[in-house]
Amino acid sequence: VWITFDYNDEHGNFGQDADTHMFAEIIDAINTACPKAKIVVLGDCRGAHVALRYLAYRDNPSIDTLILESPYGSAEELFNTVSGSYLQPYIG
């Protein structure tokens, strides 16, 4: 079973509390429906940040594997990385 979800990027959301809460609700629903499930979490950028925040506050043994691609620890870190990567050629 694959369960995926995405965000509406229209409002500049960067993996805040609402995202982590929504992720927790999905994990809880999986645990309720399939108590013996072994969950693989794959997070990319903001999704990796949400997964890290979730696991920092909740111990969930059903999460068997965690794959993080381009995670960031804070919005400030994200902005600095993006500006350094994309704006540096323009600002010298």
Image (cartoon, grey):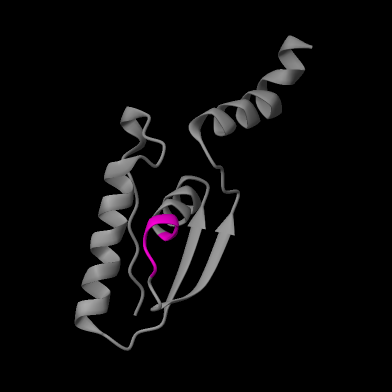
Q: In the drawing, does residue 81 fall left or right of residue 24?
A: right
- Stretch of the chain drawn in magenta: 55-59
Write the residue at 67% across / 19% down.
87
Q: Where is residue 5 in the image (x, y as percent from the top left)?
A: 32, 57
Q: Is residue 21 above or below residue 9?
A: below
Write the residue at 31% across / 47% down.
19
Q: Where is residue 18 in the image (x, y as percent from the top left)?
A: 27, 43
The quarter of the image holding the N terminus is bottom left
Q: Farthest residue in the bottom direction?
A: 36
Write the residue at 57% across / 48% down.
71
Q: In the drawing, does residue 80 fall left or right of residue 11?
A: right
46 inside magenta stretch:
no
Write the residue at 56% across / 33% down.
78
Q: Is residue 57 above or below residue 91?
A: below
**Main SS of residues in magenta:** helix
Nearer to us in this view, 49 or 57: 57
Q: In the drawing, does residue 31 fall left or right of residue 72?
A: left
Nearer to us in this view, 44 or 19: 19
Q: Where is residue 35 in the image (x, y as percent from the top left)?
A: 27, 85
User: Residue 60 lies in what quarter of the image?
Assistant: bottom left
The quarter of the image holding the C terminus is top right
User: Residue 80 lies in what quarter of the image?
Assistant: top right
User: Residue 81 lies in what quarter of the image?
Assistant: top right
Q: Position of residue 11 (x, y in %)?
A: 31, 29
